[in-house]
Image (cartoon, coloured by chain):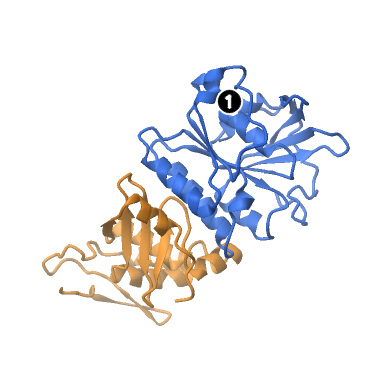
Chain colours: A orange, B blue
Amino acid sequence: SCFVRPAVSAIAWQGAAFTLHKGRRHKPTPWSIPAAIPDDLLLGLKFIFGPSAVPALDLVDQRSVTRVVSPSGRTAYQVLGSSGKLYTCYSSCHFCTCPAFGFTVLQKSESLLCKHILAVYLSQAMGACQELTVSEEQLTSILLAEEEDEG
Amino acid sequence: MAAALERALGPAGPEADASVPEAPLLVLGPAGSGRTALLLRAALAGGGDGPRALFLAPSAPSRLPEGGGGDPRALQRLELRYPPTLAALAQELGAMAARARPPGLLLLDGLEHYIQGGPSAPARLAALLLEASRAPRPPARLLAALRVPPPGPRVLPVLRRYFPAECRLRPLPGVPLRVNVRLVLPGSVPRGWRLRFEPHGGLNVTPGPGDGDGDEDEDGDGSGDEG
């Protein structure tokens, strides 16, 4: 499949380069990020979410977020981390199986959320979630997935 | 959930306020303070016209409630189930979402029994309950009880992230079978009741003071009251 990275803009921030999709100059593909993200929104993301912002945007670019749905309509999210580990995020409240959520968010209260939860929000807003339907039992076991080790 | 509690306990003291925001509610109290009795009373509040209620606990309560205010129909809308493990509880919660007529009230007794595993265990349990209560449309109200002192120093701060409303039970020192109840809701004045457990199993409720006593260790977790 033709994976096209969004066009790179001029912004460099603390050594990290933001990518901005500068409008559709090519035929839209189903998974392309549909809209340009204005600089002030990116600034806002960085200001509020700090170190999670850029990694979350990377996860969105990589189409790492999957919305998992069961026949009864229950949902959960699975996020493929950079190391290949799969994390589970809940849909109706903040919970993630990654170690950063347990430590940085819950224990230290240093962050509002982890990069995976932020990636879920961004993917929802940008229509970049993959979709997967599973049985009720499978969804229950996804919700019960154990906390993953660092990855 | 506070509305159900107020229906269960009647109007509170002079600070009673008509607009009560609904929020997942955590009932805290030491052993023998009446958490189970309070949950069951909240489940049966409203008599036969109240919402369908699902009451979950690790094991059956030692005493089942009398009919709600004498209305036998109240017991008919109460379902009691006893999942022994977290996995079984998750199955019950999953099944709840799949029902044609999901309950309007979800009550869980014995949170401390289901908190197993690593440091995220309290968060996972709370999140599972919130997911289950929000999955049916319209969302169910949620009430969960935790015995204090909690099974670890990090449990209560984490649970409080998921349960904005809190109801604290405090047995009156030196007075057997009497408990002070204090309901704390976000953005609202705390309200209070006094409970008296009667020998034949009844529960007598009267309005009481809603204010706390300052820095007492209400949570039983060894530190002062963090509000």
How many other residues sit within 10 Å of disc 1, few (<14), some (14-19) or many (≥20)?
Answer: many
Query: Which residue matches tag 1?
Result: B45
Residue B4's x, y, as percent? 57, 30
Residue at (30% x, 55% y) in the render: A134
Q: Within the image, what quadrant is residue A139 found in?
A: bottom left
Residue B128, can we see it? no
Residue situated furthest right in the rendering: B174
State left or right for residue B151 relative to residue A34: right
Q: Quadrant of the N terminus of chain A?
A: bottom left
Helix, strand or loop under label 1: loop
Chain letter of the residue carrying label 1: B
A14 or B143, which is in the foreground? B143
Residue situated furthest bottom in the rendering: A15
B62 or B106, which is in the foreground? B62
In the image, residue A74 above or below residue B196: below
Residue B107's x, y, as percent? 55, 39
Residue at (44% x, 49% y) in the render: B91
Residue B51's x, y, as percent? 48, 28
Residue A100's x, y, as percent? 51, 70
State left or right for residue B90 relative to residue A36: right
B201 or B34, which is in the foreground? B201
Residue at (76% x, 35% y) in the render: B180
Amino acid type of the residue that numbered disc 1 sits on in the rendered structure: Ala
Residue at (63% x, 37% y) in the render: B188
